[in-house]
Amino acid sequence: MISIGTSPAIQAQETPTPDPTAASIVQGMQRHDQLQSSTLQNYESLRHYSVIYKGFAKTITANMDVEVDYDASSGKSFRIISQKGSGMLCEKVLVRALDSEREASLDKRSTGLNAHNYRFDLIGTDRLEERLVYVLSVEPISPSKFLYEGKIWVDAADFAVAKMEVQPAKSPSFWISRTMIHHTNHLTNGFWLPEQNQSETKVRIGGTATMSIDYQSYRITAAPESSTTPPEAGTR
């Protein structure tokens, strides 16, 4: 995984709040998101998608490798570099997942994890990879196929979302009865970026589709820094 160093503002961790409230944690999340958004201007990465559908006494699979380019001003763009397996799953599941993510990336105001879109409740604390995290329940203020409900784990030092266990607030299709999503982010040279995503979808006509996304090989470009030494390239 290749990335470059980032600004001291991103590297510096905030001191965990002694007596946090849901509101103070959400404020910390918003500060983190604003700082990362202003610093992280572009990244490129590779993703490996796989989906397994089990139903009607048979199993079908599909796999897809995708190049992703994120630009702070224009959102995400995707280029499929290989695919194999079921053409139906590639078209109806994997390509649609790319289309939904592209659409969501263009409308950050109505899809952001903030007090404008969600209600939050502090459940407690936990540890992920030896880092203290706050556990919050999230509930959308208005149902949307781009919003979700469930639990999130927020890093107590950086106020970044490290883990999510959620389901869509509104089903994207009549044929889908339920989808559970497990997602993790990882700290990479000061930036919190997606690491792995797995979703399990129950289909009304019978069967279960499990989709996994592995996020690989980030190449990150930070915003120009006016008062600090330019970052040096590094390898993770």
Image: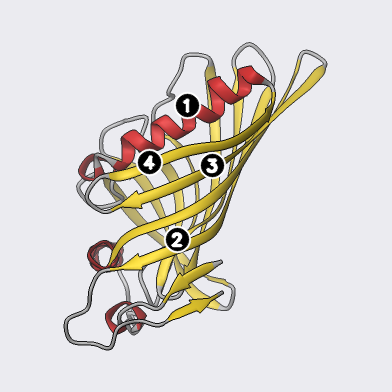
Question: Around disc 4, counting alpha carbons within 10 Å, would you say few (fewer than 14), some (14 to 19), or many (20 or more)?
Answer: some
Going from the N terminus, do you reach mark 4 or mark 1 first? 4
Residue 81 left/right relative to 96:
right
Name the amino acid, label 3: Val
Q: Nearer the viewer, mark 2 or mark 4?
A: 4
Number of numbered callouts drawn = 4
Query: Residues under labels 4 and 1: Cα distance?
Result: 13 Å
Q: How is the image coloured?
A: secondary structure
Disc 4 target residue = 77
Residue for point 77% across, 13% down = 56
Q: Give the secondary structure at mark 2.
A: strand
Query: Residues under labels 3 and 4: Cα distance?
Result: 10 Å
- The answer to whether one can see residue 162 in this image is no
Going from the N terminus, do you reach mark 3 or mark 4 first? 3
Query: Residues under labels 1 and 2: Cα distance?
Result: 22 Å
In percent of width and height, residue 81 lies at 56, 38
- The answer to whether one can see residue 8 in this image is yes
The answer to the question of whether label 2 and label 4 lie on touching residues, with beta carbons closer than 8 A, is no
Residue for point 46% across, 51% down = 151
Name the amino acid, label 4: Ser
Q: Give the secondary structure at mark 4.
A: strand
Question: Around disc 1, counting alpha carbons within 10 Å, would you say few (fewer than 14), some (14 to 19), or many (20 or more)?
Answer: few
Disc 2 target residue = 193
Disc 1 target residue = 96
Going from the N terminus, do you reach mark 2 or mark 4 first? 4
Going from the N terminus, do you reach mark 3 or mark 2 first? 3
In percent of width and height, residue 217 lies at 55, 60
